[in-house]
Image (spheres, rainbow, N blue to C red):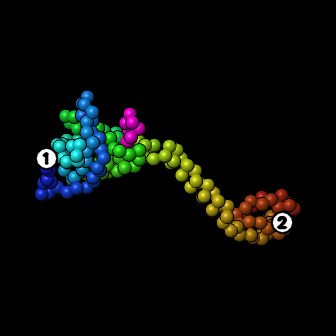
Amino acid sequence: MVDYSLLPNEGVLLKNESVWHPIGKRNGNIGELILTNLNLIYLKKSAFGGIKEVLKFPLNQIKIIDDNVQVIISKSSGNFCQMELFFINSHEVFIFNSLIKKQVLRWADKISELLTGHEANIDPSERNTIPGFGIATDLLKNTIGTFKEALKEKENVTNRCISCGAPLSGIKGEVKKCKYCGVKQTLK
């Protein structure tokens, strides 16, 4: 059984226990993925749950192009969420035992924040956990805004026509046509 320990200046930021790491053409292993401020650590587990091997991937080896960390969030062949990271000398895939994309996005964002200071550059449509969710929420916000506007109390006013002096009444801001002389004017 292999043991691991963190460096004195290293701290754990994220941890996930059921992550599959396919290696080459082999099947890979289920293990534990740990993000520290310095490394991405993958603990290969044995059949009995002990640590079989420790893989360390230094964060400073992840490729950054145009201030964007090279990370892709996608679905695996089993429809689980996966995170692909492109390192200077390798391409690593971590498949999370989850169908919830939000969990994997959190990992990508945290890695990007450590390296660039901002969230990962992920297509906004990928950030929505339910297809069309962003469109639906925007539509709902616009509908609520329309209802709010319609429910605002309208102020009734009475003015005199600027041309003939006849009484004009209606809602403040409304354009009215005088029924006597035909002049259009805005009620104040």
Question: Which disc, if any, is residue 43?
Answer: none
Q: Position of residue 137 (x, y in %)?
A: 54, 52
Question: Which disc, if any, is residue 164?
Answer: 2
Label 1 belongs to which residue?
2
Q: Position of residue 158 (x, y in %)?
A: 77, 71
Identify which amino acid the numbered label 1 is placed on.
Val
Left or right: 37 with respect to 70?
Answer: left
Left or right: 126 with respect to 40?
Answer: right
Q: Which image quadrant for residue 6?
A: bottom left
Q: Which numbered disc, 2 or 1, marks the residue closer to the eye?
A: 1
Query: In the figure, 184 relative to 72: above or below?
Result: below
Q: Secondary structure at mark 1?
A: loop
Q: Sequence-wise, which precedes: disc 2 or disc 1?
A: 1
* Closer-to-camera residue (151/55): 55
Is residue 51 rendered magenta in the image? no
| Region in magenta | 74-81
Q: Position of residue 116 (x, y in %)?
A: 27, 49
Of the 4 image quadrants, the one containing the C terminus is bottom right
Query: In the figure, 3 relative to 87: above or below?
Result: below
Count of numbered marks:
2
For the residue carrying disc 1, how many other residues have a C-alpha within 10 Å: few (<14), some (14-19), or many (20+)?
A: few
Q: Residue at x 13, y 50 (%)?
A: 3
Tag 2–tag 1 contact (CB < 8 Å):
no
Q: Residue furthest front?
A: 48
Can residue 25 be seen from the camera position used here?
yes
Q: Residue at x 14, y 50 (%)?
A: 4
Q: Secondary structure at mark 2?
A: loop
Identify which amino acid the numbered label 2 is placed on.
Cys
Q: Which secondary structure dominates the residues rendered in magenta?
A: loop
Can residue 70 be seen from the camera position used here?
no
